[in-house]
Image: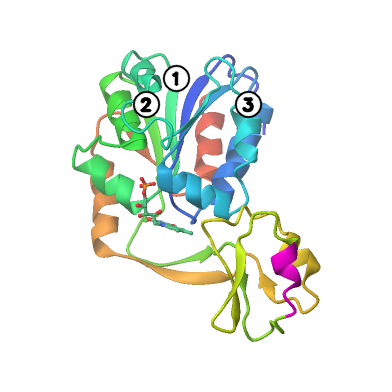
């Protein structure tokens, strides 16, 4: 694919606390950075987003996407709890697009009800006010079952309690409790040292699980499509298609 026709584009990329479609969203961010000449990405990460991105071992990648230069800032809600000045750029129409991917059910529910009390919901509201188009990828697209992958966990049936993983973890994220080893998803940064050192293959990464998309979440996604200047996409890969068709 060739995106070189788009030059000097500025986007805000919002990341919320959803594990579903998270890896795919990072993949798309990286492709766009490689393919679009002079693309500037300001990344906005909700509090839950920061936790989940760390659990999936992707936090370091954010610095490759938003290196801290002008219009390439990495904005964490933890550090900018209320109205970040960056959202003002959206209301002034300074960006070409806002992209939110993955977008949690929580954020979609707030947005469709006009709530703008967090970094990402405020950014989406300000984009609407500044006539900036928003491409939103909700994780709960339609009612039914979706498959998603979990961060690191311990398969208790394989673990022999050798405790090598506890020493190997640089973040003190692994502890022994009640006769079992467990990984604190709040401390785990997804480095994979535990998986490498475990002689019993008891550390599992990316275990696939099924989740229900609730009626209320699917209904909120439907309402999202009615907002001005909002384009709802089913999957992060559709973001690539979107820019390809803008030739
Ligand atoms: C590991 C992990 C994965 C999660 N994945 C999802 C998800 O796929 N979809 C979702 O709607 N919420 C998910 N959540 C719950 C959200 O993080 C939670 O609703 C949070 O309040 C969202 O806040 P935000 O919308 O401000 O980012 C997940 C939470 C954790 C800890």
Residue at (75% x, 60% y) in the render: 193
Residue 166 painted magenta: yes
* Front position in the image: 123 or 98: 123
Q: Against 163, is 63 above or below?
A: above
Q: Are marks 2 and 3 in contact (CB under 8 Å)?
A: no
| The magenta segment | 162-167
Question: Residue 219 appears in which quarter of the rendering?
Answer: bottom left
The residue carrying mark 2 has its beta carbon less than 8 Å from ligand 1: no
The count of marks equals 3
The numbered dot on residue 133 is 2
Q: Label 1 to label 2, Cα distance in Å?
A: 7 Å
Quadrant position of the C terminus in the picture: top right
What is the x, y in percent for residue 59? 60, 43
The numbered dot on residue 3 is 3
Q: Is residue 105 left or right of residue 194?
A: left
Q: Nearer the viewer, mark 2 or mark 3?
A: 2
Structural crowding at the residue carrying mark 1, measured as other residues with C-alpha within 10 Å and reported as few (<14), some (14–19) or many (≥20): some
**Which element type, helix, strand or loop, lies under badge 3?**
loop
Residue at (75% x, 62% y) in the render: 168
Q: Is residue 90 left or right of residue 68?
A: left
Residue at (29% x, 24% y) in the render: 126
Q: Against 124, is 141 above or below?
A: below
What is the x, y in percent for residue 104? 38, 50
Residue 20 in view, yes or no = yes
What is the x, y in percent for residue 215? 25, 63
Lower position in the chain sequence, tag 1 or tag 2: 1
Residue at (56% x, 49% y) in the render: 54
Q: Label 1 to label 3, Cα distance in Å?
A: 15 Å
Q: Label 2 to label 3, Cα distance in Å?
A: 19 Å
Lower position in the chain sequence, tag 2 or tag 3: 3
Magenta-drawn stretch, dominant element (helix, strand or loop): helix
């Amino acid at each position: 694919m060739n995106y070189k026709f788009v030059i000097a584009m500025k986007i805000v990329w919002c990341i919320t606390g959803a594990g579903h479609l998270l890896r795919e969203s990072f993949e798309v961010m990286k492709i766009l950075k490689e393919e679009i000449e002079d693309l500037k990405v300001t990344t906005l990460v909700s509090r839950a987003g920061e936790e989940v991105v760390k659990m999936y071992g992707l936090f370091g990648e954010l610095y490759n996407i938003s290196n801290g230069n002008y219009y390439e800032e990495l904005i964490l809600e933890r550090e900018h709890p209320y109205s970040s000045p960056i959202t003002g750029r959206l209301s002034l129409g300074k960006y070409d697009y806002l992209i939110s991917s993955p977008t949690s059910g929580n954020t979609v529910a707030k947005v469709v009800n006009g709530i703008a009390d967090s970094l990402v919901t405020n950014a989406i509201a300000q984009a609407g006010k500044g006539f900036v188009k928003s491409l939103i990828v909700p994780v709960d697209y339609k009612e039914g079952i979706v498959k998603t992958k979990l961060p690191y966990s311990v398969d208790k049936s394989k673990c022999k309690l050798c405790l090598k993983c506890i020493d190997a973890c640089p973040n003190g994220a692994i502890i022994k409790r009640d006769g079992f080893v467990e990984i604190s998803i709040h401390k785990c940064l997804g480095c994979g040292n535990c998986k490498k050192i475990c002689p019993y293959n008891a550390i599992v990464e990316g275990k696939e699980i099924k989740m229900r998309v609730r009626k209320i979440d699917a209904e909120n996604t439907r309402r999202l499509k009615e907002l001005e200047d909002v384009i709802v996409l089913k999957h992060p890969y559709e973001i690539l298609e979107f820019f390809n068709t803008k030739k």
